[in-house]
Amino acid sequence: MILRKLAESIRQQNWFTVLVEILIVVIGIFVGLQVDDWNRTRIQLSEESEYLTRLSDDLNESIEGTKFDIAWMSKSATLGNQVARSLETCSLADEQKNDFAAGLYRIGKVVPFYLVRGTIDELKSTGKLATLSNSTLKRKINDAIQEYEAHRDIALDLRGRMAPQISYIDSRVGTRILGPSSVLDEVGFDQLIGDFDELCKDRQLLLAVTAATNYSWNQIERSMAVLKIVEELQTVLSSPLAL
């Protein structure tokens, strides 16, 4: 309709009408483009908001899981220190026997940082990470990924270094487990297979326990470092300016 009127006005050399109709066409196109841009932006922000909500849920799960793991590993490493002290002094009071057994059972049982990566991996694989509107948030996400991957590599190295120590400990003292159990289960002194008086004379056992415990503390330190980065990311994500 507009184009037909425009053509008719040009034939009639009605330049004022031509100008008005051109302006109408231009304004219509401009408004249409603006509406299209606004609609794309609205969809993008809605999609980004959904991603950030999912990411926040993943981070909460990661933080809570890792705090639990750090607490458990710290208790295990503390028990490991007590085992080493008992072996070094060749003394074990009755009230320390169950802790001694638990320390030997738990020694070397460490876990890497617990990171739920579903949303982060999806953001990376789809290219959405690069399009996030908050530059600080993007930087914090990349920092968290780099710290986690560095921690994962160190954790694998620590496990490799710890393996010979654990193998030697297992060759010198065992634990009777009479049914299904997990690393969270505690054991008693009566479940140990080994004679304490003989064990405390074995210097290699003392060194193995000390080394494995030290590696456990190293693992805990790395987990705490990654936890700090992830908590900082969650703080930025929780900010009203995240979007």
Image (cartoon, grey):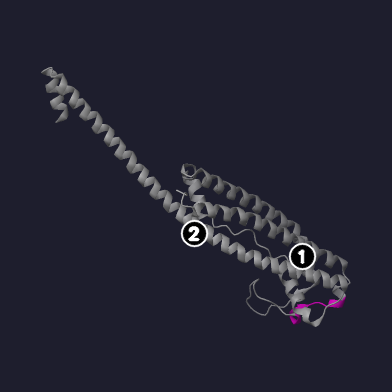
Percent from the top left, x then y, of residue 123?
Answer: 48, 48
Quadrant of the image occupied by residue 202: bottom right
Q: In the image, is residue 193 above or below residue 16? A: below
Query: How many discs appear?
Result: 2
Residue position marked by numbered label 1 in the rendering: 167
Residue 86 shown left or right of residue 182 in the figure? right
Quadrant of the image occupied by residue 98: bottom right
Identify the residue at image location x=22%, y=27%: 23
Q: Nearer the viewer, residue 36 or 178?
A: 36
Which circle, 1 or 2, is nearer the viewer?
Answer: 2
Residue 219 shown left or right of residue 97 in the figure? left
Q: Residue furthest front?
A: 240
Percent from the top left, x then y, of residue 131?
Answer: 46, 42
Q: The residue under label 2 is which amino acid type?
A: Asp
Q: The residue under label 1 is which amino acid type?
A: Ser
Magenta residues, start to end: 189-197
Q: In the image, is residue 137 above or below residue 68? A: above
Q: Secondary structure at mark 2?
A: helix
Residue position marked by numbered label 2 in the rendering: 57
Q: Secondary structure at mark 1?
A: helix
Whether 192 is among the magenta residues is yes
